[in-house]
Image (cartoon, rainbow, N blue to C red):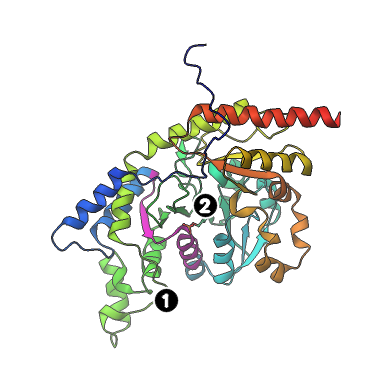
Amino acid sequence: MKNKPTLPGAGLDWPLMQNNITREDLDAAIAYLRREDPILTQSSNVRAFEREWSAWIGTKYSVFVNSGSSANLLTLAALKALHGGGEVIVPPLTWVSDIAAVLHCGFDPVFVDIDPRTLGMDNDQVLAKITPRTRAVFLTHILGYNALGQRLLDELERRQIPLLEDVCESHGATWGGSKLGTFGLISNFSFYYAHHLSTIEGGMVCTDDEEIYETVRMLRAHGLVRELDSQSRKEKYWQSYPDLNPEFVFVYPAYNVRSTEINAVLGRSQLKRLDENIQIRTENLHLFLNNLDADAYQTDFATEGSSNYALTLILKHPDPDLCKRVMTCLKAHGVEYRRGTSGGGNQLRQPYLRRLLGPDECLKYPRVDHVHFYGFYIGNYPTLERSKILRLCELLNELAKDYCRRVA
Ligand SMILES: Cc1ncc(COP(=O)(O)O)c(C=O)c1O
């Protein structure tokens, strides 16, 4: 066969992630620092990164913050400020900060199990859990897979329930031709080391809604009126509080989760090659899933429009012995992995939720529990060699064959 890659030897030397920040990005930061008296705190580069990100993702507004967790927190804080309290439907398979933000803002979390193909919330179960107290549905697009369906979107619109999208693990993934993060009232992104684009630490809150945008701008910086974009909004506050110094009007008891110019310079530099990197990562995922033994490992993920920074490896059947063998094999071949996919699996098994909801709540979500005990993720980055992916599939398929022989 033409161009058949040569398979590497035993040590695959395959880390969970390779730095997204390249020499080119560092040089952009250094060039910025070499300027005469450069501004380092949030300024014009943050603004420019927000504008460029909005254009890339397809929303009217973006607000750059210091992490994806801060994006989660401001999203729920804005929801609370503008829509009041109640229940928020969240998945047990997500990052801790999604649920923490719900709790910190005084909402009651309501959980539903996942759809194994998308790893996102089962849309029918979401609809079944909606009550008059539902204030929002806060879904997570896990590891590049779209979690949205048309019926859910239609029903939420009909019932006027805001959709919040956590896209921290799925930059550039699309559904029906539009990027994830453009369907909800608010969407969140993370620019942590592990993700598609890294600003060292960083996150983005995106929306088309001007009031949400302005509220998030204030929440990002102490609740200050001077953070507003709109002059008329500022003046309204100033007129309402004539006894206050206009520079110091605090509308909310808020936070300081601003980022810096350096982080924005790094983000702007990487954004130029984000599409190209996403395409390579997507090809890697397809190569991996197409070559895995579909009897032993799950391969039927909802890959249409996916954008994946980590390869999902989930055993098809609950099989502790094969699971152990997989881990031994990955370790022996120098393949770094994490168990349970996003956030380590079933959040309801974590101490902070066990304390709140009791030790048995986690048992009500068997599909998440399957991922918790039999799911892994492995690094997927633009420089990952195709030959390594094929070699790993060979090794994993060998294990599965061995295992089938033994149990037959
Ligand atoms: C789904 C999801 N949401 C939120 C976050 C939080 O992002 P950060 O690490 O930038 O705080 C992560 C982090 O990895 C995540 O995977």
Is ligand 1 closer than 8 angstroms to the Cβ of mark 2?
A: no
Classify 10 Å Cα crowding around label 1: few (below 14), some (14-19), many (20 and above). Answer: some
Q: Find disc 2 in the rendering and name its residue.
A: 165
Q: Position of residue 83 (x, y in %)?
A: 51, 67
Residue under the image location 59 percent in, 50 percent down: 342
Circle 2 SS class:
strand
- Pick whichever, 362 or 113, lies toward us: 362
Would residue 64 be counted in the magenta stretch?
yes
Q: Which mark is residue 372?
A: none
Relative horizontal placement of residue 316, taking residue 378 as reference (left or right): right
Relative horizontal placement of residue 299, taking residue 212 as reference (left or right): right
Q: Is residue 280 above or below residue 2?
A: below
Q: Position of residue 373 (x, y in %)?
A: 72, 49
Relative horizontal placement of residue 228, taking residue 169 as reference (left or right): left
Q: Position of residue 223 (x, y in %)?
A: 38, 74
Q: Residue furthest top?
A: 1
Q: Quadrant of residue 375?
A: top right
In three-dimensional space, the C-alpha distance between marks 2 and 1, rounded to whole angstroms, equals 24 Å
Residue type at mark 2: give it.
Glu
Residue under the image location 60 percent in, 40 percent down: 312
Q: Is residue 32 above or below residue 381?
A: below
Specify the segment rendered in magenta.
Answer: 57-78
Q: Position of residue 44 (x, y in %)?
A: 23, 58
Residue type at mark 1: give it.
Tyr
Q: Is residue 33 above or below residue 310?
A: below
